[in-house]
Amino acid sequence: MEKKYDWSNLPFDYSVTPWRFIAKYKDGAWDDGTLSDDPVCHISECSTVIQYSQTCFDGFKAYRTKDDKVVIFRMDLNEERFENSSKRLGIPVFPKEKFMEAVIQVVKANIDLVPPYESGATLYVRPVVYGTSACLGVHPAEEYELRIFVMPVGSYYSDGIKPISLCVSDYDRAAPRGTGDIKSGLNYAMSLYAGLLAHEAGFAENLYLDPATRTKVEEAGGANILFITKDGKFVTPKSTSILPSVTRRSLVYVAQHYLNMEVEERTVLFDEVESFEECSLCGTAAVLSPVGRIVAGDKEILFPTGMQTVGPVVKKLYDTLIGIQRGTIPAPDGWLFEVEG
C-alpha cells in the first residue's frame, strides 16, 4: 500500500519511495540501467565503498510550480559536479545524457510524490555511486553501482527561516589540494565528530577555516557561506577546497542580474567577518540559512541583523530564488527542466 504523506508537515528526512534507477558497471562498461522497486543495496562486505569510502553523491530538487508543472532545478550543474566527484575518486563516469534521462525517468515514475505547490515541500533527488566489488588492496573497484532515488521532503526549517549560530571548528574538513571541492561521503564523515561537538555546545553548525593558515573563511560542514557588506555587496569565499555549491552559484546570478548587486568572489579573511552586515549559509536543503552570530573561542561576532530577524538582503535573495524555482518569477534559460507526467 502506498504511503500517505501529510504534505504540509513533512520532515526533511529519508523515506522509501516506489521507484529508483539502478545501473551497474562491470567488465569496463556501464549497462543501460533500469527502474527498480528494491531500496536495498546488495554488496560485498569487502567492497571499496565499505573499506575505503569509494563513493560520491549529489543532491537537488524537483518542484511543483504554481501552474502545476513539475520542474527539476539546474540538474545539469549537479551532473557536472557528480561527474567531477566521480573522476576524483577513480569511479567511471556515468554518461551525462543517460544520467539526466535517468533523473527525469525516476521523477516521472514517482511524480505523484512531488508535493503540491501550496505545501512548500519538494521532491529531493539523490544520485549516489559506489564501488561494489571486493577489494582488500587499496585501489579502485572493478565494479560499481549507480542509484538515483527520490523522496518528498519538507522545509529544512519547520517554523520558517530564523538566524542560527556558528562556531569556528578546531578541526579541518578538507586538506589543501585534497577533496574539499567534491561531494564525497568522506568529506562529510570528516565533519561528523566536529558537528557533534558543535551541537553539544548549542551551535547549529561549524564554520571551517582554511587548513593551511586558519586565517581564511571556507565553508560550513554542509553548506557554502556568503556575506553582505554595509554598502550592499554580495561577498563569498573563493578557494579550491570549497564545494562548488549550485545554490551559491545561482544566488550569485540572482544577486547580479535580478537584484543589481555587486558580487565579489574572493579570499575572505576571518578577521574581516565582523565588518559584514549580514551572513548566511546556502545550500540545496534550506536554500539560505541566515547566521546571527559566529563564535571563535573567546571571540563572539554578532551581526547587526541579530538572532531574531532575517536580514533584508538575505530575505530578498531567498524570496527571489524560491520564486524562480517555483515558477512565480521567470527563470533564466536552461535553469528548469520540465518533467511531463
Image: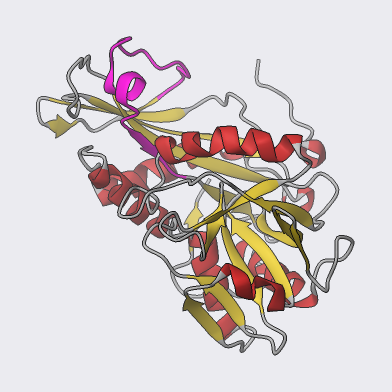
Whole-percent x and y of residue 91?
23, 37
Direction from residue 91 to residue 167 in the image, left or right: right
Instruction: Judge whether residue 243 can be spotted in this image.
Output: yes
Whole-percent x and y of residue 110?
54, 35
Q: Nearer the viewer, residue 177 or 52?
A: 177
Residue placed at 43% from the left, 60% from the top?
244
Residue placed at 61% from the left, 59% from the top?
282
Q: Residue furthest front?
A: 298
Q: Residue furthest left?
A: 27
Q: Quick check: is 54 in the magenta stretch?
A: yes
Q: Is residue 47 above or below residue 337?
A: above
Whole-percent x and y of residue 138?
19, 24
Q: Quick check: is 325 in the magenta stretch?
A: no
Please report the bounds of the magenta region as a residue range: 36-58
| Quarter of the image that includes the N terminus | top right
Residue placed at 57% from the left, 40% from the top?
111
